[in-house]
Image (spheres, rainbow, N blue to C red):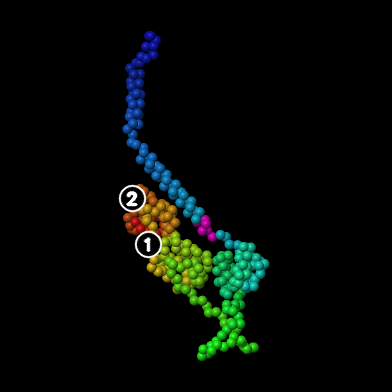
């Protein structure tokens, strides 16, 4: 009994140490019990995690889109003076075109297609604008009649004369067709088929204009065409007299409700600007007007004043 009492007897210093340890343990227990709920912190962490994941996914999609839009390397061709109406399959290949390109060209000719001007070759989807730029100086086209030969008529006083031409006459059997008038187009309603009728606009540029219009939400000024990939000063000057911008309802983006992906796909917003917009919405509240938005994003890149037409609050 004495030995047992000896184990559980403490001197004054040991009792003080034990009481201090017990007090610390009690304080720790009380701190855990009355600690503020971690639910809101957890929710905030999950919200931030979702935002980070959304930003990362948008960055990956933007990078993939930029890679898809990156122009593919164009093989260097080896052109020589040629008439595309008479060139053989072997000669097309000799100039450096691929088997697929030559097959498409030959199919076009087999169906009755003819090249009446140099631009007709450039309008084939199988020939890129870069390749056409290499070929165009070497194209040699004699006059090609568009009408049916052996049929012409004239009238005097309502009487038609025959189409037979006297031997040795210099009158052509078939008069060349009149040059087709260049249409005047509305950039907000025109389709790619009509766009290729404009000077220096091939199928690829026409498609790029339509795609840019869709990303933009509609044109408000014809000068916006300069932002289309491949639209240099010479090409814009050539088509400028034939284009206008009609009255159209611009498709606007709600700055305070649109997701990251929608915002970053607009041509006038970059990744860093969109990230700043999203952070502003989540941490400081809604964006009220254009002046506030412009002040917010101007540090992350040039702000196009036309962007104001495409946003709502």
Identity of the residue drawn at 42% across and 46% down: 50
The disc, 2 or 1, on the residue closer to the chain's N-terminal end is 2
Type of secondary structure dominating the magenta stretch? helix
Say which residue label 2 marks: 285
Question: Residue 67 location in percent, x, y?
Answer: 52, 56
68 in magenta: yes
Q: CA distance from mark 2 to mark 1?
A: 22 Å
Disc 2, SS: loop
Quarter of the rendering occupied by the N terminus: top left
For label 2, the crowd category at 10 Å Cα-Cα, with few meaning under 14, some 14 to 19 and many 20 or more, is few
Q: Is residue 27 magenta?
A: no
Q: Secondary structure at mark 1?
A: helix
144, above or below 50, in the image: below
Image quarter (top left, top right, bottom left or bottom right) of the C terminus: bottom left
Q: Is residue 203 visible?
A: yes
Q: How far across and how far down the image is residue 171, in percent? A: 59, 86
Q: Which residues are magenta?
A: 66-71
108 versus 73 height, above or below: below
- Where, by quadrant of the figure, is residue 299 drawn? bottom left
In contact (CB < 8 Å): disc 2 and disc 1? no
Residue 257, how many percent across, how many down? 37, 53
């Amino acid at each position: 009994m004495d030995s047992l009492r000896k184990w559980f007897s403490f001197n004054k210093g040991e009792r003080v140490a034990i009481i201090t340890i017990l007090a610390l343990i009690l304080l720790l227990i009380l701190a855990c019990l009355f600690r503020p709920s971690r639910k809101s912190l957890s929710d905030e962490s999950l919200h931030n995690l979702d935002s980070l994941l959304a930003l990362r996914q948008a960055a990956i999609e933007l990078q993939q889109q930029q890679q898809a839009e990156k122009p593919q390397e164009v093989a260097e061709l080896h052109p020589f003076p040629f008439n595309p109406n008479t060139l053989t399959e072997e000669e097309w290949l000799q100039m450096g075109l691929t088997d697929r390109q030559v097959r498409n060209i030959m199919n076009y000719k087999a169906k009755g297609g003819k090249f009446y001007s140099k631009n007709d070759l450039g309008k084939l989807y199988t020939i890129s604008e870069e390749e056409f730029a290499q070929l165009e100086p070497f194209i040699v086209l004699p006059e090609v009649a568009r009408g049916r030969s052996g049929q012409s008529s004239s009238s005097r006083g309502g009487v038609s004369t025959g189409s037979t031409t006297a031997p040795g006459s210099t009158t052509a059997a078939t008069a060349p067709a009149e040059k087709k008038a260049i249409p005047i187009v509305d950039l907000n309603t025109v389709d790619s088929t009509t766009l290729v009728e404009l000077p220096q606009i091939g199928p690829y540029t026409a498609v790029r204009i339509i795609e840019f219009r869709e990303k933009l939400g509609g044109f408000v000024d014809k000068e916006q065409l300069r932002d289309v990939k491949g639209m240099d000063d010479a090409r814009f000057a050539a088509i400028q007299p034939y284009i206008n911008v009609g009255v159209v309802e611009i498709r606007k983006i709600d700055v305070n409700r649109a997701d990251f992906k929608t915002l970053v796909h607009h041509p006038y917003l970059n990744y860093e600007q969109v990230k700043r917009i999203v952070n502003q919405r989540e941490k400081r509240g809604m964006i009220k007007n254009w002046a506030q938005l412009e002040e917010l994003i101007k540090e992350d890149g040039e702000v196009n004043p036309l962007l104001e037409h495409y946003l709502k609050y």
